[in-house]
Amino acid sequence: MPVETIRWKNGKIRYVDQTQLPTRLKFVECGDIKRFWKAIRNLEVRGAPALGIAGALGVILGMQHSRAKNFRSFIKELGRVIRFLASSRPTARNLFWALERMEETAMENRSRPIGVIKEILLEEARRIIEEDKSACREMARHGASLVRKRDAILTHCNAGGLATADYGTALGVLFEAKKQGKRIKVYADETRPLLQGARLTAWELMHEGIDTTLICDNMAASLMAKGRIDKIFVGADRIASNGDAANKIGTYNIAVLARYHKIPFYVVAPASTFDFSLKTGKDIPIEERSAGEVRTVLGRIEIAPKNVKVYNPAFDVTPNELIAAIVTEKGIFRKPYGRSLRGVKGK
Amino acid sequence: MPVETIRWKNGKIRYVDQTQLPTRLKFVECGDIKRFWKAIRNLEVRGAPALGIAGALGVILGMQHSRAKNFRSFIKELGRVIRFLASSRPTARNLFWALERMEETAMENRSRPIGVIKEILLEEARRIIEEDKSACREMARHGASLVRKRDAILTHCNAGGLATADYGTALGVLFEAKKQGKRIKVYADETRPLLQGARLTAWELMHEGIDTTLICDNMAASLMAKGRIDKIFVGADRIASNGDAANKIGTYNIAVLARYHKIPFYVVAPASTFDFSLKTGKDIPIEERSAGEVRTVLGRIEIAPKNVKVYNPAFDVTPNELIAAIVTEKGIFRKPYGRSLRGVKGK
């Protein structure tokens, strides 16, 4: 059973503080939107689908005590809350997708009393959570059909239960394959700088009884050269209309290695991760994070000269040509993506 | 002026303890061969050419108090010392090269008194240091001819003064280019697990006033995709007859990325790194190190579940086809390496 990563509880957002894993499984109950913004910024809550849920619940948190007496002031206040939440992290599409959906829901119900709109928004947030859970199961089911009995699979960063409401995207596929009796072996990239692979993915995989081996990011090529990787599954933070996919820094690296070694590279993501307003991945905004993340390890030990310059993009973009297939809750999509991905668009 | 990484001083080996950098520049004077073996094992002394010197000085340390009264017992004792030192680390060719050279020197002087042989061995060790210094200068000179005025260069691990007697191999090229007035920009891979790039290379580059940017290993591909890397220079630990080159884990990764992005990838190493007894890189023994190096950062903080399995090869092998040129003290060698590298062989 996956951990319940994030949910609404008695007027607060209850979430797993992912910066504390794997040492501590700590739940936080947060009733303050500024504190919650920091939780997103600091990656206490992270992972594209989970950020969608964080956006939806953040709106509830920000609006529950609204004293607006008419829709006009309510929607103005809602706009401020949404812009504030949107400023936390720029890359994951799901955050903006959820914020837009909450705003649309309010607009559709503009003629109702404010109290009722608040209730409808909470229902909508809960619906987003439920939809994410069922999307996880569907992605897992579709993706598992790509996994063979004794596959050795490489994954990067964390696209598991901690990144979603439930089962995970890329890791959901692996959990499902395991459940189907496939004896897979999984290699997890540690994923510097914030080590989500070492801290979160290794923990989740072992929790589900999957044969797990941790490697440093620069060791994947050596495994591939030895024929020890059969497939690669990763998540995504934003996918453009043409299939170019932004994901955690280092993903593009693996995709290039996969091409050289002729290993299929799969992306697993729900429809909420797609941004059809963008033609290609070149238009995806990439978050650059602080130098301290690279100069230290988790802020706890210094590993470099104090004043050394740093380049620290949190994501990179994998061009569609390197992606063997994109797995969504609506099925498995293949090249040419420009055409096939239209199937993700419709409700 | 580079730091004097390792030398002989009053019956002891004086070296920089590289595990303490960049926080502390600590010199150790070691008079005990078992302690020195651990210093090699723990990477207090590291870097292929420096390991050659460590081997030669280790022989002096192990034999200086020998009470052997005839050559037969002397050479037997020497054999034990050499086997002991050789057991410290398996991959870097230079260590074995220096040990063999010391043994040959003893054999060539077998008819002399033991006291004289000891003096000759110390002279030979000092000659190895002097030759390494001059090889560094020559490699730097040849290699710098490949660097253009405003090149942005990526390097991996540490192939600098700390890895040699003097100036470095790959970094020596960059120091020389800087000295020639070329305004280069260097990106240093941090190089997990032991972070020699972050701790040592960044420190050395900044010390020489070179524009230095530190990145995590998985960020190099992102820079290449943006056209921000013009060339790659790395060192080597062992090079086979056909040009296949073993170097720090992650090097092969970069070589594949370089091929995909059409960026020239150069290896810089002295003749003492070549192993002409090996046809290809497949025969190079690759050291696997402890799981703790990956599960922790420098043994100081835990970053993964305690019992997670780990794959931790210290080196990987870059096939010759991915190497644009190999720079040695004897010049620049290009494909086909099987033929061209014969030029490295002769004295």
Image (spheres, coloured by chain):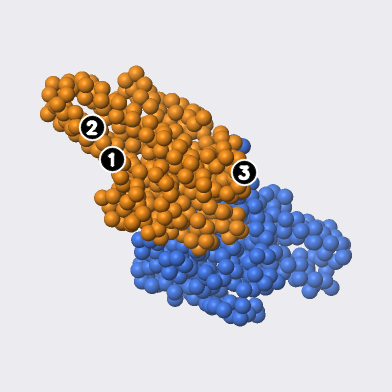
Chain colours: A orange, B blue
Q: Is B41 located above or below residue B226 in the figure?
A: above
Q: Is residue A269 left or right of residue A214?
A: left
Q: Same chain for the residues at labels 2 and 1, yes or no? A: yes
- Residue drawn 56% across the image and 34% down it: A207
Q: Residue B54 sits in which quadrant?
A: bottom right
- Residue drawn 56% across the image and 51% down it: B18
Regarding residue B187, the answer to whether it shows in the image is: no
Q: Residue B15 sits in which quadrant?
A: bottom right
**Disc 3 and disc 1: Cα gap in Å?**
38 Å
- Give the labeled residue for mark 3: A183
Evaluate if marks 3 and 2 touch, with contact meaning CB atoms under 8 Å apart.
Answer: no
Badge 2 amino acid: Thr
Quarter placement of the C terminus of chain A = top left
- Residue drawn 76% across the image and 67% down it: B103
* Disc number placed over residue A105 in the picture, else none: 2
- Residue drawn 79% across the image and 74% down it: B108
Q: Same chain for the residues at labels 3 and 2, yes or no? A: yes
In-front residue for pair A65/A25: A65
Q: Earlier in the sequence, mark 3 or mark 1?
A: 1
Badge 1 amino acid: Phe
In the image, residue A53 lies at what x, y percent? 34, 33
Evaluate if marks 2 and 1 touch, with contact meaning CB atoms under 8 Å apart.
Answer: no
Mark nearer the viewer, 2 or 1: 2
Q: Is A220 located above or below residue A138 in the figure?
A: below
Neighbor class of circle 2 (other Cα within 10 Å; few <14, some 14-19, many 20+) is some
Badge 3 amino acid: Arg
- Give the labeled residue for mark 1: A96
Badge 1 marks a residue whose secondary structure is helix
Q: Residue B226 sits in which quadrant?
A: bottom left
**Disc 3 and disc 2: Cα gap in Å?**
44 Å
